[in-house]
Image (cartoon, grey):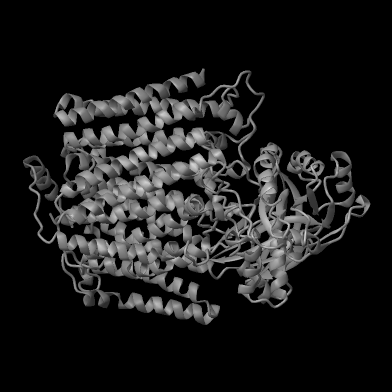
Amino acid sequence: MPMTSRRVLMLAPLGVAAAGGLGFYAMLRGLGTGEYDPHGVPSALVGRTPPEFSLPPLVPSGLPLLASADLQNLEGPVLVNFWASWCVPCVVEHPQLMRLKREGVAVYGVNYKDKPEAAMAFLARHGNPFQRLGRDEPGRVAIDWGVYGVPETYFVDRKGVIRWRWAGPITPEVLEQDVRALLRHYA
Amino acid sequence: MRRLLLALALLAVWLPLALAVSSPSEMLPDPAQEQRAQEIGRQLRCLVCQNESIEDSHADLARDLRHIVRERVAAGDSDAAVIDYLHARYGDFVLLRPPFNLLTAALWGMPVLALGGGLAAILLLRRRGAAPEPLPLSAEEQARLAALEKDPAE
Amino acid sequence: MIGEFGHFALALALALALAQTVLPILGAARNEPRLMAAAAPLAFGHLLAVGAAFLALITAFVVNDTSVITVVQNSHSAKPLLFKVAGAWGNHEGSMLLWVMILALCGGAVAAFGRALPGALRARVLGVLGLVAVGFLVFILATSNPFGRVWPPAPDGQGLNPVLQDPGLAFHPPMLYLGYVGYAVTFAFAVAALIEGRVDAAWGRWVRPWALGSWCFLTLGITLGSYWAYYELGWGGYWFWDPVENASLLPWLAGTALLHSAVVVEKREALKVWSVLLALLAFGFSLLGTFLVRSGVLNSVHAFANDPARGVFILGLLLFYVGGSFALFAWRAPSMAPTGMFAPLSREGGLVLNNLLLCSMAAVVLSGTLWPMFADLLFQQKISVGPPFFNTALLPLAVPLILAMAAGALLPWKRARLWPVLQRLWWAALIAAGGVALVLAFAGWRIGPAFGIGGGLWLVCGALADLADRIGLFRRPAAAWGRALGLPRAAWGGALAHAGLGVSVLGIAGMGLASDRLAAVQPGQSLSLAGYEWRLDKVADAIGPNWTARRATVTVLRNGDLVTVMTPERRFFPVGRTTTTEAAIHTTFLADLYAVMGEEQNGAAVLRLHYNPLASWIWFGGGIMALGGALSLTDRRIRVAAPAPRGAAKAAA
């Protein structure tokens, strides 16, 4: 029958619809498990070294300042955490950062668009997890890193390459599942 | 935010309103440069507000990005250089005009694919269907059609 | 009480819809007239039950019954009455109820006006409509009950989002839904045709009024939404290529194609299988939009509250109706004999080109909307597809469409020659070229707007040329009036709709020439823009029913003469604590003056002023298109297809 190509053509809509349906189903499942997130924005810096920058210290904290030179020739992996005292999710993730500090993980902080007094009050109240702390009052260095909201956390391996970025608070789950695996892998 | 959507959706959960009536102090003094900056800004996506260009958004980040665009433009960067500057920091997601690459080839090729596919299907069916065979109408339908056609059409 | 009554009515509607599905389809299959005859009364009963539920919800909103969750979440006693009523469909649950309400209305209309349909076809169409209703009623009852209770009742509601408290938006969803859901009827006709295994000229005639009516409402709905964005958003944007907007454009494109291909089915018995597919597609796209908006898979802040359970349910419905009908299509369509060969250069050839271009545009819009989601899913790559893509990718399809539109309407059926047609269009081409030249001369080297103006003029003049040709204006001017009166309304409607698109294109092109100015101004100071002097007189407080505002008074002068006084505002809604910006718009025939007020600093107010040439033509054109469709709908050739036996024709229509 010369009808076959016609038949195939008429099957095409069903094929497209089925493929689309399968995809949509996978998206809905992914929404539930967190594997598919229409709102997440990936980092363009993963696999690259951080941009050149130098941030002034948060003077009253007594912590050393943070510059790109501090992210080269490291002794071990480092977490770079962008935070602000006005950011509610930052409070949520703070205990996890404190825990990492107790375990001896180096956490460097970037205080984003914040007032020194407010930032100090935040650290006094919730504890200070940072080994180094830079102030990014204009928010320009954050943009160089591709930050689009706080908190955001970057994982830098000992060679100084960014391996991972988390947008949003580091919850206990993120700490256990992602951060620990990274720490083991890049130890 | 493309608030029109609401239209359809009618219901948004999160709608910070108060418009991007930005501040005049943001603008570049040179109108030609400001014009260029606006055109560049319209091709860059505001990352926190979804589906809105940085020119149209009043989010803080969008304002910072507008500022950067103007700074680069004032420094004499070409349009492409300004866009590359933000692309290097935020990746493909920031580009409202997706770059042409393997991933978007089918997307950019869609007008040609659709037209070509459609034409091919038409030609295929024309060849196959070369022998027209009218389907006989039932008696009932013939009667009705006859009645309908009695109307002074055209 | 109202809540329970509405809930019960919905459950009753489900039972009736189930019966409306099973009995007539069974009857048609077994050729039992009594079962088939049950379709119409069941459709009426179903309509009554859904109508009762719908009225119950509106009553709950009007009396502010705060024991109903939907009311608590979306209404407030201090809201004006119109927005209390509109608030009933300003939320997920209520809008789904509106959806099934309109579906039931369509079923009722088929039952009432479809008496001339062959019994089996009518039974099957009503049966399929019932089946669609069953799915959505189950969805509402299972996951989105609008009559859910809170106990004890809340003291008052939480208020409706202030952006939604706007007359434009009160009418926008019903219009849009009438369009979407209207395509359920053409869908039902297509499925019935596939079950019967035959499509003929009569089928084309019955489908066309429904395709036309849905198209008119959808056109109006999209136009209204676009206009609403223009005045409510406060910066003059009117179309953003957002996924949710695209979701309304897709059925419109497929529906427009269907409208044209159904003519070919009716006149030439060709494109039958294709028209069936388009009818399935138009409704499929409507359902796809519903899924995208309500499931949470979209990256859009405007999507309804996300609930994966609802998403899976709607996906199931989508797959059942779209997948099921496509499977039926794959199974039955190949056996429908391909008929109606025709020359490429003919009216039907032109309509095929129209369909090809419209469907290619739909393919571009669809892939632009869905590809970011699928790229993320399949390759974990996030990309954005925004206005620059759509504008670029659709242009090569829109240009030939506009060029061919004027000529296509002038082509005779069966076999045509291009030259005589072009001869009748030379003056349209001349005017279009003149328009391009004028814009280039006066507005500078603005290629896009210039050719947009040319394209719009070409369409409007092409439509006029079409009418002039049909009434023989140039051949026998004396008889033209008589012929004009005798011209079928469908011909007037078609020309009007084409001209309407031309008017919209002119408006879009004019907006390409818009200029604006942003400045902080002290009271008493003036700004100049587009030859007007805009003077800020004062900024004062104002109070509305459920808001307070800062209102600027801007006097617009031209050469010292008063043009208008504009009062842009910033409104603050205490319930919900939101601020909205109300633009002041002064519309004239040739341009809109548009003023927005920003923040106040040190006694100065930030003003953003826009001069938007031809802006209102965009929506005016949309209105003309819908009017053209409505005019076609009153054509007696179409009317006789819908209502019944000859004697009843007048009454029913």
Is residue C529 rendered to the left or right of residue A53? left
Where A79 falls versus C610 (above or below)?
A: above
Residue B49 appears in the rendering: yes
> In what quadrant of the picture does the C terminus of chain C appear?
top left
Where C242 falls versus B10 (above or below)?
A: below
Is residue A107 rendered to the left or right of residue C344? right
Residue C271 appears in the rendering: no
Toward the viewer: C125 or C548?
C125
Where B15 falls versus C347 (above or below)?
A: above
**Which quadrant of the structure image shows residue C396?**
bottom left
Where A113 falls versus C453 (above or below)?
A: above
Toward the viewer: C420 or C353?
C353
**Which quadrant of the structure image shows residue C523?**
bottom right
In x, y percent, where is residue C243? Answer: 49, 52
- Write the residue at 49% across / 41% down: A28
Is residue A19 rendered to the left or right of residue B91? left
- Write the residue at 69% across / 43% down: A180
- Write the residue at 40% across / 71% down: C455
Toward the viewer: C278 or C110?
C278
In x, y percent, where is residue A142? Answer: 74, 58
| Number of numbered labels in the structure image | 0
Is residue A50 rendered to the left or right of residue C360? right
**Which quadrant of the structure image shows residue C622?**
bottom left
In x, y percent, where is residue B59? Answer: 69, 54
Toward the viewer: C565 or C103?
C103
In x, y percent, where is residue C308? Answer: 51, 36
